[in-house]
Image (cartoon, grey):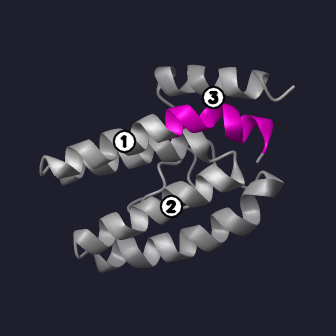
Amino acid sequence: MSTFGRAIRPYVDAELRAADEAEAQGQAGAAFAHLERAHMLGQASTVQHVRVHWRMLPWGLRQRDVRECAGQLLRIGGAATKTAFGLVPTGNTGGSNVSPLARMPVPPDLERRIREALSSDG
């Protein structure tokens, strides 16, 4: 795993835990919002990028959302094969409700964490 991937992982992990907690409380929408935040954080690391899409897939299954599941299967393949080449649109939230090519604004708190992790990448 890259230095960036190791540096960003604790923040991705925190968002994934928040997603689990929200879903356990019956807040599926809030859970997905945390998965989207995890996606924005980790999308520059192949491992973290694939990992987040892998977590979005069972969320879609639990919601019985066929479109989300199909979108995540495509995105898992894209994340696995394109991330290392930098072919990821900054800020994309990763859900099937947005184009996988759309650039989106990154919230300031996440932008700060990404910058910190990138600076540790040497």
Near-viewer residue (69 or 3):
3
Q: Amino acid at mark 3?
A: Ile
User: Could you give the CA–CA distance between mark 2 and mark 1, rounded to whole angstroms?
Assistant: 15 Å
Task: Tell me the magenta residue range.
Answer: 2-12
User: Could you give the CA–CA distance between mark 3 and mark 2, rounded to whole angstroms?
Assistant: 18 Å
43 shown above or below 58: above
Quadrant location of residue 83? Answer: bottom right
Q: Categorize mark 1 by other alpha carbons within 10 Å: few (<14), some (14-19), many (20+).
A: some
Residue at 62% in and 34% down = 8
Q: Earlier in the sequence, mark 1 or mark 3?
A: 1
Left or right position of 104 against 69: right
* Residue 114 marker: 3
Near-viewer residue (105 or 1):
1
Q: Categorize mark 2 by other alpha carbons within 10 Å: few (<14), some (14-19), many (20+).
A: many
Magenta: main secondary structure equals: helix
Quadrant location of residue 117? Answer: top right
Instruction: Give the secondary structure at mark 1.
Output: helix
Q: Which residue is mark 2?
A: 53
Q: Earlier in the sequence, mark 2 or mark 1?
A: 1
Q: Amino acid at mark 2?
A: His
**Residue placed farthest to the left in the image?**
26
Q: Which residue is mark 1?
A: 17
Q: For residue 62, say whether it is visible.
A: yes
Residue at 30% in and 74% down = 61
Q: How many dots with numbers?
A: 3
